[in-house]
């Protein structure tokens, strides 16, 4: 029996939730797992795995912008992030001296690795997408990523290998030899499961992501929701608000749903409207949904790229939130040339393969 | 100090120096063009402006080429 330290980044819940099937698989193999995270990521994993040891392990604040200008704010935040990574390294050393670990799994935490303990890094972003004018920065970021990946034994990418079935497009394409040597494409990893239940909900709208853009999208969608015909549920992703509203016979607004409630609603939905964040993408791929409308968070280049990529591939329709005409965009999204994602291997299969081909070497 | 942090600090210093040099370059060239126009040397000013356009065009084209060839 080995001991594994799992440490997801707390920028949204996506990193923590995609680690759930990995942690479950490690526990199924009778290994000890210690969860080291902060904020909501830690809360979610503590709820999911109450028997695992957990450590409060602060990371760095997400540089989400309150305006559309994500890049300048990100540049300004870099020194603070570097300081946080320096603290993260010190805290990690303290954690490692208190216990013996056989493997470290870092989900997008750059400073969570050790030269003495095998360390793996999980990321879907080997490559950043920036506006064309910043191409030297994009090139530099590739080199920087190669350097960072060199600190880990493996870089696990929750996507299919580059090619026709890659859901993250160029984001999951390795750019340097350092990365290429270490990369392992696990296929999608999500805690959402496909359930054998009927699709009786016409539309599920999932509003998520950082404020104030989440609130702006909420306002835009609530103004337009009456224009669509059929039953709909709107998940506001707003945990502070608890009042369920019924806007009409066909439309319910739920301020916040648990992971399981969300999974249930996603399974029931015929058509999903959501941000083009990679966590939602993996959930939609896992459930095999082929009708959706993506609305990227303004200024988040990753989501903007994925929206553009899915349009280009003819998989899904996307629309900017400020140009959204819900009725018209849903009509476009229903057109037959949008095929949905290609059929990809499911999480259950992927996580077993990941264990056999990567983790088992260090743990068994 | 940890080598990751040292590399990060050096990288940041390099990035900010590059940004400052770029801004300085823009101000110096803009000042030069204005000075030439004030002096009435329109020919030289036009050549500089044309060079800026060509450089900008080549810069963007390089980015497009890198994208098209999947290098970035």
Image (cartoon, rainbow, N blue to C red):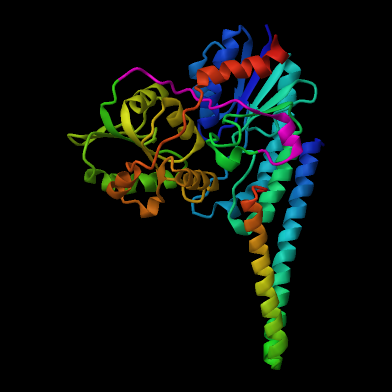
Q: Residue A349 placed where, x, y %?
A: 53, 17
Q: Is residue A216 above or below residue B53?
A: above
Query: Magenta-highlighted stretch: main secondary structure?
Result: loop
Residue A46 showing in the rendered view? no
Q: Residue A34 placed where, x, y %?
A: 62, 16
Which picture quadrant has residue A172? top right
Left or right, A99 with reference to A225: right
Q: Is residue B54 above or below residue B11?
A: below
Which picture quadrant has residue A57? top right
Q: Nearer the viewer, residue B23 or A158?
A: A158
Q: Is residue A357 above or below residue A148?
A: above
Quarter occupied by the C terminus of chain A: top right
- Whether A128 is among the magenta residues is no
Which picture quadrant has residue A272? top left
Left or right, A187 with reference to B29: left
Q: Residue A112 placed where, x, y %?
A: 69, 29
Q: Nearer the viewer, residue A38 or A159?
A: A159
Q: Residue A241 placed where, x, y %?
A: 34, 34
Residue A292 showing in the rendered view? yes
Q: What is the span of residues highlighted in magenta in the rendered image?
A: A174-197
Q: Nearer the viewer, residue A112 or A323?
A: A323
Quarter occupied by the N terminus of chain A: top right
């Amino acid at each position: 029996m080995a001991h594994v330290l799992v440490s997801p980044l707390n920028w949204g819940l996506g990193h923590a939730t995609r680690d759930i099937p990995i942690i479950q698989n490690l526990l199924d193999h009778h290994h000890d797992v210690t969860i080291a995270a902060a904020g909501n990521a830690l809360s979610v994993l503590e709820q999911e795995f109450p028997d695992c040891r957990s450590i409060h392990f602060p990371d760095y604040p997400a540089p989400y912008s309150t305006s559309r200008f994500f890049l300048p704010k990100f540049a300004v935040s870099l020194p603070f992030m570097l300081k946080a990574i320096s603290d993260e390294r010190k805290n990690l050393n303290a954690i490692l001296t208190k216990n013996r670990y056989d493997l470290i799994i870092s989900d997008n935490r750059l400073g969570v690795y050790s030269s003495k303990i095998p360390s793996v890094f999980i990321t879907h972003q080997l490559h950043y997408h920036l506006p064309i004018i910043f191409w030297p920065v994009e090139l530099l970021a590739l080199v920087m990523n190669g350097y960072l990946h060199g600190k880990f034994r493996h870089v696990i990418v929750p996507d299919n290998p580059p090619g026709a079935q890659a859901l993250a497009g160029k984001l999951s394409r390795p750019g340097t030899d350092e990365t290429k040597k270490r990369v392992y494409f696990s296929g999608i990893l999500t805690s959402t499961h496909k359930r054998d239940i009927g699709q009786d909900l016409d539309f599920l709208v999932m509003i998520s992501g950082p404020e104030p853009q989440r609130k702006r999208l909420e306002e835009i969608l609530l103004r337009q929701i009456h224009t669509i015909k059929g039953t709909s549920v709107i998940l506001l992703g707003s945990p502070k608000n608890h009042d369920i509203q019924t806007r009409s016979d066909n439309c319910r607004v739920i301020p916040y749903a648990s992971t399981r409630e969300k999974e249930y609603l996603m399974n029931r939905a015929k058509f999903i409207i959501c941000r083009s964040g990679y966590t939602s993408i993996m959930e939609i791929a896992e459930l095999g949904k082929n009708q959706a409308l993506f609305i990227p968070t303004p200024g988040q280049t990753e989501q903007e790229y994925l929206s553009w990529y899915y349009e280009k591939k003819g998989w899904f329709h996307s629309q900017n939130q400020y140009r959204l005409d819900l009725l018209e965009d849903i009509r476009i999204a229903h057109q037959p040339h949008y095929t949905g994602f290609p059929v990809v291997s499911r999480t259950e299969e992927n996580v077993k393969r990941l264990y056999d081909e990567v983790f088992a070497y260090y743990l068994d | 100090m940890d080598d990751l942090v040292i590399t990060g600090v050096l990288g940041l210093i390099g990035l900010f120096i590059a940004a400052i040099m770029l801004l300085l370059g823009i101000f110096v060239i803009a000042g030069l063009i204005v000075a030439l126009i004030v002096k009435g040397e329109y020919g030289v000013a036009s050549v500089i402006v044309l060079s800026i356009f060509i450089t900008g065009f080549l810069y963007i084209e390089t980015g497009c080429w890198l994208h098209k060839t999947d290098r970035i």
